Amino acid sequence: MESTSKYWIPVFNILESELNIFLTHPKYVKVIRSKKTDKKDSKWIANIFKQDLLKYSFIPPKNIRELRKISHYRIKLVNKRSSERNRYQNCMTVSNIALASVSTDHLGKNCKAAMDEILKSDIITEDNLKKILKGSVSKKSDQIFQAIQNSHIESDQRFKINCTIKHMNNLDEYIQNWLVFETTSCSMCSFGYQE
């Protein structure tokens, strides 16, 4: 079978349990330039297969393919979350909020609490900030206050920050759920190894 885009996958999935399928890359079965048809291509592939001239692609077993799909999707979710974090940081920069210069984790609990206060309140005082901050970061309340003191959030940036926060929270939840699903799928998979 010649692999063309993703169209070979459903056919392969149906036939793999009943037949021994050999998948090959199109560049290995190129026909001499002429008018191409599916029938001519099929004959050509059959002929070079009979002569044992095909290079086959490795197709892992079904359980491994499923795990790969699961892992690839989780990676895509993590990449989306990274994009949202960058968007969030850009909104903070545009709004003159310099929490990243004071805290190593501008997405940590304390910085999130400070951002919530900035988004809720029109006026932020150092006393309000001290009440919000927990742990060792509370000792840096004066530095954090200076980092947010001259902030000015435009309405579009406020909307964007709120959207990115919600989206990051959703993505965090999806990633956690997907990780549980991935772990469960991995533990249920039989890799054919025996102790």
Image (cartoon, rainbow, N blue to C red):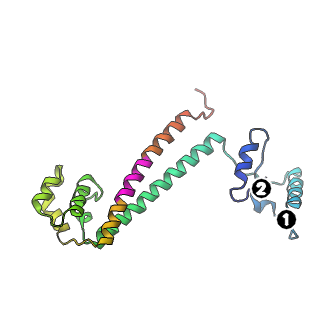
- Residue 25 location (% of width, % of height): 74, 58
Q: Is residue 54 above or below residue 153?
A: above
Q: For the point 23% across and 54% down, which residue is it?
A: 110
Q: Is residue 172 magenta?
A: yes
| Residue named by callout 1 | 31
| Residue named by callout 2 | 2
Q: How far apart are the two marked residues, 1 and 2, measured between alpha carbons?
A: 12 Å
Q: Is residue 79 above or below residue 59?
A: below
Q: For the point 60% across and 33% down, which residue is it?
A: 190
- Residue 16 location (% of width, % of height): 74, 42
Which of pointers 1 and 2 lies earlier in the amino acid sequence?
2
**In terms of image quadrants, where is residue 159?**
bottom left
Nearer to the camera, 132 or 162: 162
Q: Secondary structure at mark 2?
A: loop
What is the residue that sits farthest to the left in this orientation? 127
What is the residue that sits farthest to the top in this orientation? 195
Neighbours of disc 2 within 10 Å: few (<14), some (14-19), many (20+): some
Q: On the rendered structure, is 98 left or right of 12?
A: left
Number of numbered markers? 2
The amino acid at mark 1 is: Val
- Residue 1 location (% of width, % of height): 79, 52
Q: On the rendered structure, is 26 left or right of 43?
A: left
Q: For the point 38% across and 64% down, which residue is it?
A: 86
Q: Is residue 193 magenta?
A: no
**In terms of image quadrants, where is residue 15?**
top right
Q: For the point 73% across and 59% down, which residue is it?
A: 4
Neighbours of disc 1 within 10 Å: few (<14), some (14-19), many (20+): some
- Residue 46 location (% of width, % of height): 87, 53
Q: Secondary structure of the magenta portion, mostly?
A: helix
Instruction: Give the magenta range.
Output: 165-175
